[in-house]
Image (cartoon, rainbow, N blue to C red):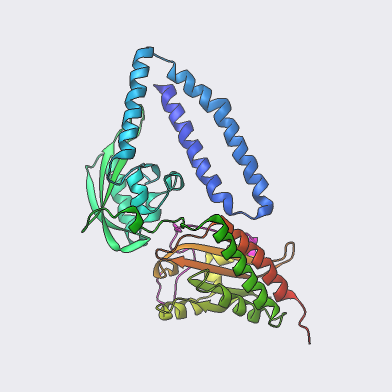
Amino acid sequence: MAQTDEFGEELADFVRRVAELKAARSVPADDLPTVLDAAIFELDHVAGQLWPWYESLSSTGPSGVASVDRQEQQLLKALFQRVPVPVALVDRETVVRRLNLAATSFTGVRAGYATGRPLTGFLAHADRAAFRSQAAAVARGDGDRSLTVHLQQQPAVPVRATLTALRPSGEPRTAVLVVLQPADSRVPSPERVPGPVPTLTETTRHAALMDLVDAMTTALLSGPVGDPSGVLERAAGVLHGRFADWVVADVAGAARLSRTAVLAPTDSVDGARGVAAQDPAACPLVVEAARGGSTALPVRPEDPDAFGRDTSGAPILVRANVTSLLCVPLTTAPGPVQGVLTLFRSGARRAFSMAEAQAMDMMSRHLALAMSAPDMP
């Protein structure tokens, strides 16, 4: 039993490391070989150590009992996946271990993406603390709980979350089984739930990105260069609406960052004023991008204060209902950072993809060149 517990802890550590590697996919292209080396190391670890260890544990004990246990586990897995109710299995920290097919359709999140990430990341910011508290209470044996939450992609639809404790076979810690259902209607069909992946083909998505790059190049070539504020304002006009709901541009001056442009949805005029009045030095993401020169691509950002607060004291990411963001330094490495461009997507709009982040990284270098080029008469 001690060996089984030790194997379970080693496997849990491996899952956490894989989640970190997934999050590291947003690093610049020059740093991707390091991430790839780490991924290959983890695969070697599975093949060379975890799998032989698992085979050794599986062969322990009467073969007949082991065979029956495996059949029972396969049956339970099949039932979990096919039950027509959205169900998730999480730990006491709300990290998703399993997500069934109904839950992927209901939340619009793929099971492979959700596994290893906190379930609270898919909820509205206002519901996250309460959900964490209730999940911790259930995990420590305080009884089943039920509360109303809201999915971040459908904030207007109340969802009833029922939590119950579950002790998986052979595991030392209690897990939490979460059942999700609309509070006032039946489970919506998959076609009614906006998913993170569009139905367009890869070719169409690539063509749309190329159109965006072409529009950006045209805007940079058709206007004066050498004026950082003017260049960023033209770039923000290209990106706003067609690529991002919010565009925030900051210029890196000799002494400090200064906010140049804030473009927001038409129904967020007050919010745009608050963001425009904000000191960029109070935005941790912007400061980190300007200091380290690395792109940030958080999906459903966990920290509501990652972009600071507006003049009223409200977290900007919460007020703008940000579901995905890109924070891109404008630099021609190894040169200095000329500025920082931050893009928000909110509501049900799909998250920024890796392909979009790569296209934005390419455009950021063009922007930096236009900002630092000598102005022509």
Which residues fall within the magenta stretch?
291-314
Nearest the viewer among 324 and 102 is 102
Q: Is residue 100 left or right of residue 302?
A: left
Snapshot quadrant of residue 212:
bottom right
Residue 220 vs 168, above or below: the answer is below
Image position, residue 286 (x, y; %)? 57, 67
Q: Residue at x 39, y 78 (%)?
A: 267
Q: Residue at x 29, y 55 (%)?
A: 188
Q: Is residue 87 visible?
A: yes
Snapshot quadrant of residue 205:
bottom right
Nearest the viewer among 225 and 191 is 191
Q: Is residue 355 magenta?
A: no
The quarter of the picture where the N terminus appears is top left
Q: Is residue 30 left or right of residue 26?
A: right
Residue 279 vs 27, above or below: the answer is below
Q: Is residue 255 left or right of residue 85?
A: right
Residue 133 vs 347, above or below: the answer is above
Q: Is residue 297 magenta?
A: yes
Chief secondary structure of the magenta portion: loop
Image position, residue 322 (x, y; %)? 44, 65
